[in-house]
């Protein structure tokens, strides 16, 4: 029989409630911190009841600078400077969508709430125009990049899957709305969208093509997550006196120092590790230090080549 003084957070989707009410929480904040610091637009597709809403809520607390909610968690050590960013949280999960007016109503509800804080655009403007205005105003008023969080981006589409005219109406509205994230990129600090199904880019995200852009950091986070799933202790962007290593993995007998290149060769990555002295902090630990240079291919979206060299 399991005996515990902590409550299980069954059905709890708000990070603040979990922390303030003493629920159990498995610390995933190191992964959250990595995602929050490797780029702007992210899309997460997972089935329902897989923790997407809780992750969105955790991001919201993080970007609002709620440090007190993260006491004792990994992110408390990773985050050196806590700042509050304006957060625009769009939740499409709490409504049934049977007509185009239903989608318009939920977008208008969120827009009115944001406009009450950051200023109002003319009400006769389209929802995407008002959205763009709110993002710009929020950034200008606070001097900070705006964080946009969208929970269940595809719920209206899923509910109209057997009604082609209604589906096309929803698709058109959401395509224009989400497309603002591309035009407003300079005002954004971070954008994260979750959903159940990944619709083709042509249907919804053709105006938001940077969701599929391949950057060096995109590959870094994939490698980092693989190591974490393997149970390896992994440090990302480890600073030294002359630069920072992309990743460091430690085992009882070895220290692996990684450098990644999207536009460069595996040989160049090894050269950078050597020239920048990324391995120096581990010379006195008594473990074998191994340098790993990894070259990615944007065309293949995979590892193109890697080179390994033992520190002598």
Image: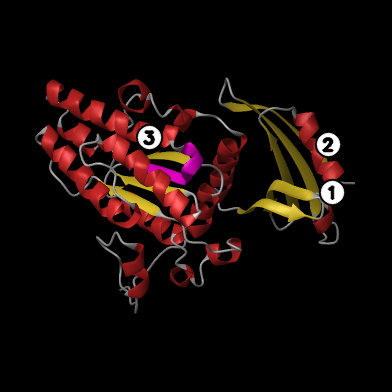
Specify whether residue 280 is in view.
Answer: yes
List x then y, in percent, for residue 186.
50, 39
The residue drawn where x is 42% and y is 44% is: 136
Q: Residue furthest front?
A: 122
**Contact (CB < 8 A) between labels 1 and 3?**
no
**SS class, disc 3:** helix
User: Where is mark 2, residue-wise?
Assistant: 271
**Dot 1, crowdedness within 10 Å: few (<14), some or many (≥20)?**
some
Dot 3 or dot 2: first in sequence order is: 3
List x then y, in percent, for residue 71.
49, 72
Dot 2 or dot 1: first in sequence order is: 2
Tell us which disc is closer to us: 3 or 2.
3
**Dot 2, crowdedness within 10 Å: few (<14), some or many (≥20)?**
some
User: Where is mark 3, residue-wise?
Assistant: 180
Q: Nearer the viewer, residue 239 or 266?
A: 239
Identify the image quadrant of residue 304: top right
């Amino acid at each position: 029989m399991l005996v515990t003084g902590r409550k299980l957070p069954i059905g709890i989707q708000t990070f603040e409630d979990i922390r303030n009410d003493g629920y159990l929480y498995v610390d995933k904040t190191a992964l959250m911190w990595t995602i929050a610091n490797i780029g702007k637009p992210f899309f997460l597709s997972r089935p329902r009841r897989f923790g997407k809403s809780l992750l969105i809520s955790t991001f919201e607390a993080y970007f609002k600078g709620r440090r007190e909610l993260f006491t004792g968690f990994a992110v408390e050590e990773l985050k050196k400077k806590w700042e509050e960013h304006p957060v625009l949280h769009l939740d499409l999960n709490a409504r049934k969508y049977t007509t185009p007016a239903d989608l318009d109503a939920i977008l208008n509800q969120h827009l009115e709430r944001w406009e009450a804080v950051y200023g109002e655009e003319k009400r006769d403007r389209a929802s995407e125009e008002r959205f763009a205005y709110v993002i710009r105003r929020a950034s200008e008023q606070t001097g900070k990049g705006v964080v946009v969080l969208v929970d269940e981006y595809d719920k209206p589409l899923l509910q109209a899957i057997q009604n082609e005219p209604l589906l096309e109406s929803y698709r058109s509205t959401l395509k224009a709305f989400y497309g603002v994230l591309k035009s407003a990129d300079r005002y954004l600090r971070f954008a994260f969208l979750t959903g159940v199904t990944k619709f083709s880019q042509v249907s919804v995200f053709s105006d938001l093509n940077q969701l599929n852009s391949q950057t060096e950091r995109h590959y870094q986070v994939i490698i980092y997550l693989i190591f974490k799933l393997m149970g390896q202790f992994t440090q990302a962007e480890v600073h030294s006196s002359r630069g920072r290593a992309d990743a460091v993995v430690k085992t009882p007998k070895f220290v692996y120092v990684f450098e990644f290149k999207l536009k460069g060769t595996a040989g160049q990555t090894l050269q950078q590790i050597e020239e920048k002295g990324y391995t120096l902090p581990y010379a006195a630990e008594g473990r074998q230090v191994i340098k790993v240079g990894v070259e990615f291919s944007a065309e293949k979206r995979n590892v193109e080549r890697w080179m390994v060299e033992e520190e002598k």
